[in-house]
Image (cartoon, helix red, strand yellow):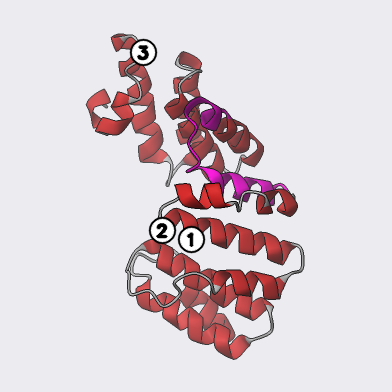
Amino acid sequence: MSAKDLDRYARDQLQNLPAKLADRVARHLVMAGLLVATDPETAYKHALAARARAQRNGLVREACGETAYAAGKFAEALSELRAARRMNGQLLYAPMMADCERAMGRPEKALAYDTPDIRAALDDAGGVELTIVVAGARRDLGQVDAALRLLETESLNSKNRSEWVARLRYAYADTLLAAGRQEEAVEWFHRVVAVDGNKITDAEERLSALS
C-alpha cells in the first residue's frame, strides 16, 4: 500500500508532518479508507495507528471519527470529530456528530446541530443527511408529525440519482409507516426502490414484509 494512494487533498493535509512520518500516516489512512465499509473495526485500528503518530492533525482525527462511527463506537466517534472540528473549523461532520448524540440516547442534543451556520456549510447531500438525523431525533422524542414536516422540506421528488435521494425517500417512507400511514409508506418504499440501484437500503425487504 502506497501513500500515493491517498487522494491529493488528504496528502496536502499531511504536509505539516516530516516526510517519512507523513508517508506512514498516509498508508494507515489509505487502509482505513479501504476497510471502513467491510471491516470497520480494523479500519478504526488503522486510524488509531495514524493518530498515535499525528495526534494534532485534523484529517487524522476526522478519520478516527469516521471509522469509529462505522464501527458503532459512537462516544469515541463524537470525541474524535469534535477534536477535528477544533483543529480545522470544519462543520461538515455535523450530521455524523448529531447521529452520534442520537445513538447515545440524547436526541435533544442531536437537534442542537440544526443551525443556519451548519446548514450553510453543508452541500446538498450533507444537508439531507442532517435532516434525516434530526427527523430521527424528533421521532425519538415522539414527534412523528414534526419529523414528517421536516423531511417534506427536502427534495423528495428530485430526479437526481445520488444516494442521498434514496436515503431521504427511505426515511420518509419509514416515518410515514411510524405515523400509521401504511398505504403512503408503501408508495414511498416503491419510490426508494426506483432510485436505489446500489441497494443501500432494504426497501425491497420492507415492501415484502408489508405486502
The span picked out in magenta is 83-104
Q: In what element is the residue under mark 2?
A: helix
Q: In what element is the residue under mark 1?
A: helix
Q: Position of residue 32 (x, y in %)?
A: 41, 34
Q: Nearer the viewer, residue 86 or 210?
A: 86
Label 2, label 1: how many angstroms apart (C-alpha)?
A: 6 Å
Residue drawn 55% across and 28% down? 86
Q: Position of residue 11 (x, y in %)?
A: 29, 26
Residue drawn 36% across and 13% down? 17
Badge nearest the viewer, 1 or 3: 1
Residues under numbered marks 2 and 1 in contact, where contact means CB atoms less than 8 Å apart: yes
Q: In terms of sequence position, does the residue under pointer 2 or pointer 3 come before the other?
A: 3
The amino acid sitting under disc 1 is: Val
Label 2, label 3: how many angstroms apart (C-alpha)?
A: 33 Å
Q: In what element is the residue under mark 3?
A: loop
Q: Main secondary structure of the magenta part?
A: helix
Is any atom of residue 6 visible in this view?
A: no
Q: In terms of sequence position, does the residue under pointer 1 or pointer 3 come before the other?
A: 3
Report which quarter residue 136 is drawn in: bottom right
Residue 72's label in the rendered image is none
Residue holding disc 2: 124
Label 1, label 3: how many angstroms apart (C-alpha)?
A: 35 Å
Report which quarter residue 80 is drawn in: top right
Residues under numbered marks 2 and 3 in contact, where contact means CB atoms less than 8 Å apart: no
In the picture, measured across the screen, residue 108 lies left or right of residue 197, that is right
Residue drawn 41% across and 53% down? 123
Q: Position of residue 19 (x, y in %)?
A: 29, 11
Q: Position of residue 23 (x, y in %)?
A: 30, 17
Residue holding disc 3: 17
Residue 194's place in the image compared with 62, above or below, is: below
The amino acid sitting under disc 2 is: Asp
